[in-house]
Amino acid sequence: MNELLGSFVRALLGMLHPRMLWLTVLPFLLTALGWGAALWFGWEGWVGAAHGWLSHWGWTASINSLLAGIGFGHVQMVLAPLVVVAIAVPLIVLTVLLLIAAISMPAVIRHLGARQFADLEPLRGGTLLGSLLHSIAATCICVLLLVVTVPLWLVPPLFAVIPPLLWGWLTYRVMTYDALAWHASSDERRIIFRTHRVPLLAIGVMCGMLSAVPTLLWASSVLMIVLFPFVAIVSIWLYVCIFVFSALWFAHYCLRALRRLRARHHGTDRQATQARPPGSA
């Protein structure tokens, strides 16, 4: 627990470094330009498609009639945009996460490796291809779980529990690999994955809960949903900042765990050497 909190404080202080702030720029620009264009040119078409899709379901007509009967008929107007937002937000978060893992995490590792972990020999147990395949596999599993659990997002309080758990698990799987790819060997990475699974998942879930904060922008009122293409730009910047902080948190925790693992290993080797009888081969 002490190491979990200690790495959190170090990551928080690290976010104030100009280099870390600079690392938010490129992922933000790429995500904002891509999703900004998609939402700007496709918003009306997507809302129309969602409205057509909803109109084919009998249960939506029943819900609309119920809402109109109790004086909430205006809610029908935002149901289709709400569906579009509910689908777009996880995809935006996923895009930001993958860009941070591909662009910002290597820079974070080089920055920390040169300043605070210069004593760690880089064994390069991970590769760019390995990181890509690992991220794709974890993303596919997360998207599958996302699709399966979407109906539950409309049920309180599951809408506040399921997304952080999903993003937490995905963040933990993706960022732990990338945090250790340069310095740890394959065996060391597997050991840390196994022995530190609970605190690493806890970091992922807490970062997933932080990533829910930008969602409050568009969920705060009906007007924010109508202005979602604009609100999404601000949300993307917040997502990028949160995931860069997450990269720092995972990097601090994982590299310190690697340092302790090697210290124990070297201590065991020294004890074995001292215990060896004189003259033995």
Image (tube, grey):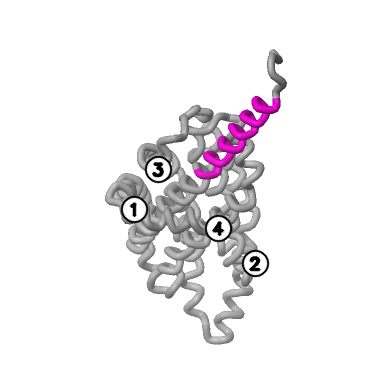
**Mark number displayed over residue 2:** 4
Label 1 and label 3: CA atoms lie apart by 38 Å
- Residue named by callout 1: 36
Indicate the secondary structure of the residue bearing disc 1.
helix
Residue type (three-letter) at the residue carrying disc 2: Gly
- Residue named by callout 2: 58
Residue type (three-letter) at the residue carrying disc 3: Gln
SS assignment for the magenta stretch, majority: helix
Label 4 and label 1: CA atoms lie apart by 41 Å
Residue at (60% x, 67% y) in the render: 154
Label 2 and label 4: CA atoms lie apart by 53 Å
The tag earlier along the polypeptide, 1 or 3, is: 1
Q: Is residue 60 left or right of residue 239?
A: right
User: What is the x, y in percent for residue 86?
Assistant: 51, 60
Residue 234 falls inside the magenta stretch: no
Residue 269 falls inside the magenta stretch: yes
Q: Nearer the viewer, residue 169 or 108?
A: 108
Residue at (57% x, 80% y) in the render: 67
The reply to whether callout 2 and callout 4 are in contact (CB within 8 Å) is no
Which class describes the residues within 10 Å of circle 4: few (<14), some (14-19), or many (20+)? few
Q: Is residue 220 left or right of residue 2?
A: left
Q: Mark 4 or mark 1: which is in front?
A: 4
- Residue named by callout 3: 116
Residue type (three-letter) at the residue carrying disc 4: Asn
User: What is the x, y in percent for residue 247?
Assistant: 45, 48
Against 12, residue 111 (above or below) is above
The reply to whether callout 2 and callout 3 are in contact (CB within 8 Å) is no
Residue at (60% x, 57% y) in the render: 165
Label 4 and label 3: CA atoms lie apart by 19 Å
Q: Mark 1 or mark 2: which is in front?
A: 1
